Image (cartoon, helix red, strand yellow):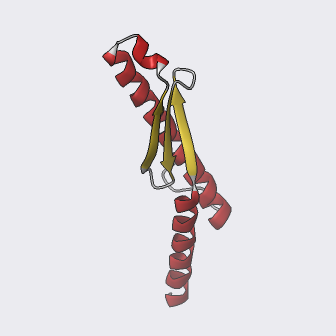
Amino acid sequence: MKNMLREAQKLQTKLMEELRKIRIEGSAGGGMVRIEMDGEQNVLAVKIEPEVFEEKDVAMVEDLILAALNDAKKKVADKTKESFQSITGFPLPGM
């Protein structure tokens, strides 16, 4: 039982190391708004093309930021699932 727990801890450590390496970019508005996120879902950067502000439509900018964030989060979840399966050989539980 101890060995099994130790092995599970090793796998968890390896997965966390892999997640820290992941860099994903989510985008919206044809790339007008881009959000970079790491595998732990920390937002690393937000880039907004100046043309977005020419419309002076705050609601549109908010919607684009939200869409880019959701796109990045989905990509991180997909990459996490892929990393988990490549490390363990099993699909990520609950996904």
Identify the residue shown where x is 58% and y is 63%.
Answer: 18
Q: Position of residue 20 (x, y in %)?
A: 52, 61
Q: Position of residue 59 (x, y in %)?
A: 32, 17
Identify the residue shown where x is 64% and y is 65%.
Answer: 87
For residue 69, above or below residue 3:
above
Identify the residue shown where x is 48% and y is 51%.
Answer: 94
Q: Position of residue 45 (x, y in %)?
A: 46, 43
The number of discs equals: 0
For residue 49, above or below residue 23:
above
Question: In the displayed image of the protein, which residue is found farthest to the top?
Answer: 55
Q: Nearer the viewer, residue 15 or 29?
A: 29
Q: Position of residue 52 (x, y in %)?
A: 45, 18
For residue 11, above or below residue 58:
below
Identify the residue shown where x is 40% and y is 10%.
Answer: 55
Question: In the displayed image of the protein, which residue is found farthest to the left?
Answer: 58
Q: Horizontally, is 7 left or right of 40 in the view?
A: right
Q: Horizontally, is 33 left or right of 57 in the view?
A: right
Q: Nearer the viewer, residue 53 or 11?
A: 53
